[in-house]
Image (tube, rainbow, N blue to C red):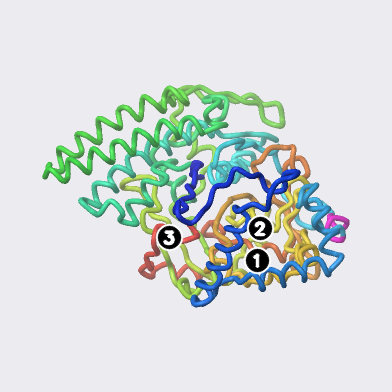
Amino acid sequence: MSGLRIETPTCRTPVNMISISPWRDGAAGSKPTQNRRNQQLLAGRMEIMAKKQEGFLTSGMVNKFKKNFVQNPANKVALNAVTRGNLAEIAINRDVLNDVNFCFSNEIETDSVTDQKRAGTCWLFAILNWFRTYTRKKINVKSFEFSENQVMFWDKFEKANFFMEAVIDLGNCDIDDRKLRFLLENPAQDGGEWHMMVNIVKKYGLMPKEVMVDTFNRENTRYLNEILYYMLRQAAGDLRKMMAAGKKPDQLRRKKNAVMDDVFRILSIFFGMPPEKFNWSYKDNDKKFHREIGITPQAFFDKYVGLNLDETYVLLSCPTDRTPYNKTFKIELFDNMVGGIDWMTLNVPVGELKKIAVKMLKKGDAVLFGCDVVQHSHSKAGILDPKIFDYETLFNVKMNMSKTARVDMGQTKMTHSMVLTAVDLVDGKPVKWKIENSWGTEVGQKGYFIMSDEWFDAHTFDLVVPREYMPPRLLKLFDQKPVVLPPWFPMA
């Protein structure tokens, strides 16, 4: 999730193109103003000049647009409604709203919904929510939550190091080099993907939430990112100066390591310092008491999750010419750890994702997936459906881009990760899905969303699949050498 930039545009008008008059247009008893005549004259001259340029919008065209607008009474009704209210409520399709039913033919037991709050860490929450479905089964408890605070600490720490190493790798590239600008835009962003969690878990493990509880800055990363980004951009500038001066790699890394010492201190102040070992106890559903003394985070993951991270795969469904089906892909600079694994995925039709998701849910396993939650989403009601908003009727327009066109034209991208916890099957085919989100309990049905099968087709992009659910024919395709996509590819 990127920070906000406020840019103030400047309007530069040549002085000789305007005339300043002391008369106020429309003032009682005022003379016909020279200013108004000058403006009309200037507009006329501009139009005469611009007609020589193809594509100029003439005053005649604008007048026609105005006439078309006022001739249709429905436009006045829409104007009055939209200017006075929330578009999402005005355009809502009540047929879809009335058809919502949170009852599913195949559903797993779920926990209370977590809340990422004002942090762009949906991927982190979704993966930990998926992990805890395995933990609850292993230890026979109704509720459990991992420490998101601990994972965020190590993710930011490793991303800072990865960023500076990437700056060093780019060497003395031009300051406007696109990859450099991409790195500088978000040096250690909140966002991430499956492989980043794998890197963190393998190196640092996991722990229960009560061992390293939330802080203000886990819930709101604005201030952390302001400080951290400043330090990293400053370090990037220093490293580039050193490279321009011909400094050797060992000198560059001494500088980088000094900055990493600062980064560790900053993160420890914002999050607290993660423990190397901890004590933990719990009672299971049978009231039996259990205790761990001096367990490491790595041992905790192995014992209480036990998922084989090396045999868990990412399937993508991105139907573009750049990403043909049955090919593997990776994205350049889409990493969080030097020496970690890369994001690698196999692109397949969306129907393959659905078949695997149904199989997992029927066997009682939740499903981790990625999508564009911005599209056709009513957060308050917790509805994901392509028909939830009737914008076409309201604005009298056609909005019918295909999934391929939306990706290619920048209308859609991977924006969110969540967990599938139920599917409703009719004659063996899915019609709707239940989703565990990470936006707290104030939205949807106590934080759970309902997704139509049509929305799955239109806006779901990837699925994380354990080996036992991978079809052998797809598994073999992972042996291919992946095609490398640019850092700005919309699935990153």
Residue at position x 58%, y 50% in the image: 417
Task: Pick whichever of labels 2 and 3 is earlier in the sequence.
Answer: 3
| In this rendering, the label closer to the viewer, 2 or 3 | 2
Q: How many marks?
A: 3
Q: Is residue 109 among what the camera can see?
A: no
Percent x, y for residue 193?
Answer: 49, 50
Residue 120 shown in magenta? no
Mark 1 near mark 3, Cβ–Cβ under 8 Å? Answer: no
Q: In which quarter of the view is residue 122 placed?
A: top right
Secondary structure under tag 3 reads: strand
Residue 90 is left or right of residue 345, and the answer is right
Q: Which residue is mark 3?
A: 344
Front label number (1 vs 3) = 1
Disc 3 marks a residue whose amino acid type is: Met
Q: CA gap, disc 2 to disc 3?
A: 25 Å
In the rendered image, which residue does mark 1 sit on?
Answer: 458
Q: Residues within 10 Å of mark 1 (few under 14, many from 20)?
A: some
The span picked out in magenta is 95-100
What amino acid is found at the position of numbered circle 1 in the picture? Ala
- Residue visible at 26% across and 40% down? 237
Mark 1 vs mark 3, CA separation in Å? 22 Å
Q: Position of residue 15 (x, y in %)?
A: 45, 51
Residue drawn 41% across the image and 28% down it: 267
- Image mark for residue 156: none
Q: Nearer the viewer, residue 432 or 334?
A: 334
- Residue that badge 2 annotates: 375
Q: Look at label 2 and name its amino acid.
A: Gln
Disc with the residue nearer the chain's start (2 vs 1): 2
Viewer-closest of 442 and 314: 442
